[in-house]
Image (cartoon, rainbow, N blue to C red):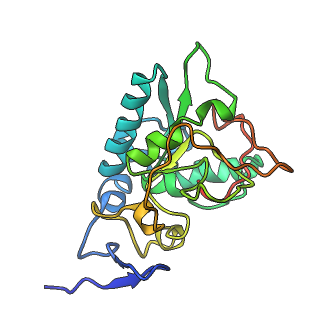
């Protein structure tokens, strides 16, 4: 049997190398074989999310409904072609893939009215729901004790920012036991009413109703 190699993360936790012929993963086995892999169109199909991520996103949606909030997936998987389109339009600073491309991120529109809510702060409740489901929120990227210049209010992902480099290089993919908040050394989950630290000189106040109309400037989605 081929021995599985590991890569040591920043916090000294071994991460399994699951890319390679000997061990498949959702990205290799499903996304790369799907017609949508190269499509420039937006994908909001939850089935295009890695199973653990998919279940976590469904939990966020269900828990939001209990709070009388309606969350609707607006983007799950994103192809390289679509990412390049955003880059050409100046809607992102990332010319290549992000977490969406690997089925590990989802953007959710708040639809408490007939239109997607464009006010970022209205999505603040999602941070607690995301963390409870085992996801990283784009509101604080899993680091609530730090101010952030960029907030992707409606974005959730199952990878820490530190681990993205390995993911994008296709040398690592999270298995079912991967816990991003634990990777960050987090000992508690933020509560809905916990304050959000915002740098006063640059307050990011808008969430995107669609990705074609929002000028993203972050580096993590």
Q: Quadrant of residue 115?
A: top right
Residue at the spot 63% in from the left edge and 32% down from the top edge: 210
Total tally of numbered discs in the picture: 0
Q: From the viewer's perspective, is residue 161 above or below residue 17?
A: above
Q: Is residue 152 left or right of residue 20?
A: right
Nearest the eye: 104 or 138: 138
Q: Position of residue 193 (x, y in %)?
A: 56, 37
Residue at the spot 54% in from the left edge and 38% down from the top edge: 42
Residue farthest to the top, as pictured: 114
Looking at the rendered image, the quarter that the N terminus falls into is: bottom left
Q: Quadrant of residue 121?
A: top right
Q: Quadrant of residue 220?
A: bottom right
Is residue 208 visible to us here? no
Residue farthest to the right, as pictured: 201
Nearest the eye: 198 or 29: 198
Q: Position of residue 40 (x, y in %)?
A: 56, 44
Is residue 176 visible to us here? yes
Residue farthest to the left, as pictured: 1
Q: From the viewer's perspective, is residue 42 above or below residue 101?
A: above
Q: Is residue 181 left or right of residue 89?
A: left
Q: Position of residue 182 (x, y in %)?
A: 40, 64
Residue at the spot 32% in from the left edge and 57% down from the top edge: 26
Q: Is residue 161 left or right of residue 19?
A: right
Nearest the eye: 212 or 155: 155
Q: Position of residue 56 (x, y in %)?
A: 36, 44
Residue at the spot 39% in from the left edge and 83% down from the top edge: 7
């Amino acid at each position: 049997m081929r021995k599985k190699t590991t890569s040591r993360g920043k916090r000294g936790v071994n991460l399994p190398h699951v890319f390679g012929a000997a061990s498949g993963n959702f990205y290799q086995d499903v996304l790369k074989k799907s017609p949508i892999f190269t499509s420039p169109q937006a994908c909001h199909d939850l089935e295009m999310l890695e199973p653990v991520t998919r279940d976590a996103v469904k939990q966020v949606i269900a828990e939001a409904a209990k709070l009388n909030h309606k969350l609707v997936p607006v983007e799950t998987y994103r192809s390289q072609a679509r990412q390049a389109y955003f880059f050409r339009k100046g809607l992102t600073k990332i010319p290549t893939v992000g977490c969406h491309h690997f089925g590990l991120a989802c953007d959710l529109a708040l639809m408490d009215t007939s239109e997607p809510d464009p006010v970022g702060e209205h999505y603040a409740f999602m941070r607690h729901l995301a963390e409870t489901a085992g996801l990283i929120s784009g509101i604080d990227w899993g680091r609530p004790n730090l101010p952030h210049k960029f907030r992707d209010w409606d974005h959730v992902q199952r990878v820490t920012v530190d681990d993205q480099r390995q993911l994008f290089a296709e040398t690592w993919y999270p298995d079912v036991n991967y816990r991003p908040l634990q990777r960050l050394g987090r000992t508690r989950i933020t509560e809905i009413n916990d304050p959000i630290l915002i740098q006063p000189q640059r307050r990011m106040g808008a969430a995107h109703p669609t990705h074609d109309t929002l000028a993203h400037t972050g580096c993590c989605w």
